[in-house]
């Protein structure tokens, strides 16, 4: 039985593991953020289109990330139990499943224009969005494989490597975007297509860096030797854990994608303002994602060692850290919304004033959004750590689609609150998920380890 660590010791451990993961998530998000900022400078139509197209891309991408996120707690538990064979087998099958998923998902990217039109978007926005997705879809496979390898490395507490790989990728993406969107340094001016090409290039370089590190620094795991050989037992285990994780994420992401569709019904300026606010909120949410991942790994380690005492203390620490960050970002959203909006808008655009006015109202609601979203992210991460994903999937579906989407529609349209109403509905869905998932962890999740352990 492991010694019970103090709360201070848990905080130090979570910070050492979580800070690089947070930095990695922020850098990863900067890839999409760079697309949004530069296309906002390029034109309002392109800003609206990338807001919509990126919502669809990340819906598909994050569903596939379920297999990468399944790798994280499984590798953490196996490493804690000193089972290197299971570490290798888990990671390999995560790569297999991600490859299969990417091939199945590519047609949705290629025929995305029809999907966007069917969702009620204007022909012009749907065409621009499809211009991005038809190219960006070919970056889905390397992006998913990178996520599996990052999960593998993070679970082995090599989160600093994850951070530096992602920072490198974000820098490359920014340079590629600047050259290809605007046509600088002798490159053709490709607009929204340039952003897609830059993202593909970035994902491929990231994959090369992650593979190189795994081969050179961790040769004992032999990840890529005989990678073609199936391991159906472990394939099934990763599949059974990963599909509920992916569907849980899908429930949340499609709630946000649904909100983007509703904002599109309210007009191009409203959709553009939504794109800015959701981008900034998403950037700050990366802190909660990093802490959630740290919670998953620490909980997975406790689960692998049957260490209930440290599981409970670690959970308290990561939750308190997340709530402190949520309060800090809420204050910024309430005190400086116009400054944040101005980062994304051309000073000379005719629609600047209208987009600013809409965005200020959305940022006010986004403060509440941070608190609710942080709570559900931490609870979800802890439940993954103890490999409980089935019931959390059902809770997420109920909260996001049973509460969030209906409330967004009712508040936004019949009640006439517009974009602010749509966002208020999102808050209600996230809050319901946060409460129910926390209850699930502290009741069932803790019981996954016997009380005497």
Image (cartoon, rainbow, N blue to C red):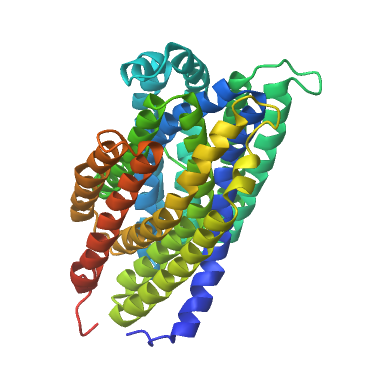
**Apparent side of residue 242 relative to residue 170 in the rendered image (left or right):** left
Q: Position of residue 104 (x, y in %)?
A: 34, 25
Which residue is found at the position 18% from the left and 54% from the top?
Answer: 391
**Apparent side of residue 97 relative to residue 126 in the rendered image (left or right):** left
Q: Position of residue 203 (x, y in %)?
A: 57, 35
Which residue is found at the position 48% from the left and 53% from the top?
Answer: 285
The reply to whether residue 34 is visible in this rendering is: yes
Q: Is 243 in front, or is 306?
A: 243
Q: Is 43 in front, or is 18?
A: 43
Q: Position of residue 228 (x, y in %)?
A: 40, 35
Query: Which residue in the rendered view is the most extreme toward the right?
Result: 185
Which residue is found at the position 67% from the left and 45% from the top?
Answer: 168
287 versus 41 height, above or below: below
Pick the quarter of the image with the C terminus: bottom left
The reply to whether residue 204 is visible in this rendering is: no
Q: Quadrant of residue 19?
A: bottom right
Q: How many marks on residues?
A: 0
Q: Is 155 in front, or is 115?
A: 115
157 versus 363 height, above or below: below
271 versus 150 height, above or below: above
Which residue is found at the position 43% from the left and 35% from the top?
Answer: 58
Pick the quarter of the image with the N terminus: bottom left
Q: Position of residue 17 (x, y in %)?
A: 52, 66
Q: Quadrant of residue 87?
A: bottom left
């Amino acid at each position: 039985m492991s010694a019970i660590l103090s709360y201070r010791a848990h905080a130090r451990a979570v910070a050492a593991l979580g800070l690089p993961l947070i930095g990695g998530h922020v850098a990863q998000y900067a890839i999409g953020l760079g697309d949004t900022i530069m296309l906002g400078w390029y034109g309002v139509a392109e800003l609206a289109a990338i807001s919509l197209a990126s919502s669809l891309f990340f819906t598909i991408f994050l569903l596939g990330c379920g297999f990468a996120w399944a790798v994280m707690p499984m590798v953490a538990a196996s490493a804690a139990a000193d089972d290197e064979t299971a570490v290798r087998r888990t990671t390999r099958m995560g790569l297999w499943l991600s490859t299969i998923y990417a091939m199945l998902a590519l047609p949705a990217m290629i025929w995305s224009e029809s999907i966007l039109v069917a969702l009620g978007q204007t022909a012009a926005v749907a065409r621009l969005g499809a211009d991005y997705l038809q190219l960006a879809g070919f970056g889905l496979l390397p992006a998913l494989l990178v996520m599996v390898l990052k999960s593998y490395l993070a679970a082995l507490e090599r989160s600093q490597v994850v951070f530096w790989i992602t920072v490198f990728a974000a820098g490359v993406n920014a340079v590629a975007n600047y050259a290809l969107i605007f046509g600088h340094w002798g490159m053709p001016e490709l607009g929204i297509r340039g952003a897609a090409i830059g993202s593909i290039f970035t994902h491929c370089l990231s994959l090369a860096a992650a593979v190189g590190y795994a081969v050179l620094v961790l040769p004992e795991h032999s990840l890529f030797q005989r990678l073609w050989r199936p391991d159906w037992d472990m394939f099934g285990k990763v599949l059974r854990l990963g599909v509920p994780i992916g569907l849980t994420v899908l429930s949340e992401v499609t709630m946000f994608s649904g909100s983007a569709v509703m904002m599109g019904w309210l007009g191009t300026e409203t959709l553009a303002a939504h794109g800015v606010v959701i981008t900034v909120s998403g950037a700050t949410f990366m802190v909660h994602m990093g802490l959630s991942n740290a919670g998953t790994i620490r909980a997975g380690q406790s689960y692998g060692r049957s260490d209930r005492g440290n599981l409970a203390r670690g959970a308290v620490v990561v939750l308190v850290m997340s709530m402190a960050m949520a309060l800090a970002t809420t204050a910024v959203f309430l005190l400086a919304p116009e400054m944040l909006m101005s980062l994304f808008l051309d000073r000379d655009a005719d629609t600047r004033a209208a987009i600013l006015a809409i965005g200020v109202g959305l940022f006010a609601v986004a403060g509440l959004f941070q608190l609710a979203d942080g709570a559900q992210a931490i609870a979800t991460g802890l439940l993954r750590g103890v490999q409980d994903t089935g019931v959390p999937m059902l809770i997420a579906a109920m909260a996001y689609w049973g509460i969030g989407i209906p409330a967004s529609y009712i508040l936004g349209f019949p009640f006439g609150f517009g974009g602010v109403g749509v966002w208020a509905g999102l808050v209600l869905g996230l809050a319901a998920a946060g409460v129910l998932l926390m209850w699930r962890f502290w009741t069932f999740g803790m019981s996954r380890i016997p009380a005497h352990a």
